[in-house]
Image (cartoon, helix red, strand yellow):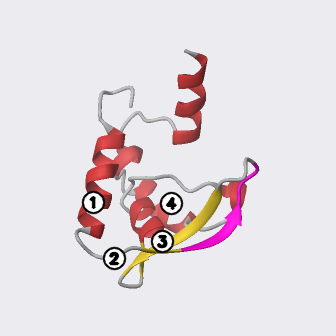
Amino acid sequence: CLDGWAAGRAATGYLRDLVQDREVACEAVAKRHDGATLALCTVDGDDLGAAMVAAGMAWTSTRYGNTYIAEEAQANFDRLGVHGHDCAPAWNWRIQQRRR
């Protein structure tokens, strides 16, 4: 993030805490335009994507559906995680990195 907050490290740590030493189950739900698989991943029935977005540790992408819109809106309202820092969405950050 432009303000120096290490979003990737924070998100990795948050996800590690969510998963701990439990088994993650993933189910393919769609394919992206580049052939990558989109999946719903859970731990003990809890949706990891929803938890990450709700905590402000990830953005939702409407490019592939309207999943997690409410979670992101609340995280943004509460200024959690990426919404409380000067962070670019991950897809914009990747584009900027490729241009360097």
Mark 1 or mark 2, which is nearer to you? 2
Question: Is residue 62 rendered to the left or right of residue 33?
Answer: left
Magenta stretch: residue 42 in it?
A: no
Residue 95, relative to residue 23: is it above or below? above
Mark 4 or mark 2, which is nearer to you? 2
Which label's residue is closer to the chain start, 2 or 3? 2
Q: Judging from the image, what secondary structure is the residue with disc 4 in?
A: helix
Which label's residue is closer to the chain start, 3 or 4? 3
As measured in the structure, the alpha-carbon distance from the residue carrying label 3 to the one carrying label 4 is 21 Å
Mark 1 or mark 4, which is nearer to you? 1
Q: How far across and down, in percent of the image, does residue 3 sit?
A: 33, 27
Residue shown at 50%/35% (left/top)?
88
Q: Judging from the image, what secondary structure is the residue with disc 1 in?
A: helix
Give residue 73's mark: 4
Residue shown at 56%/56% (left/top)?
60
Instruction: Pick whichever, 77 or 96, lies toward us.
Output: 96
The amino acid sitting under disc 2 is Glu
Question: Is residue 23 rendered to the left or right of residue 87?
Answer: left
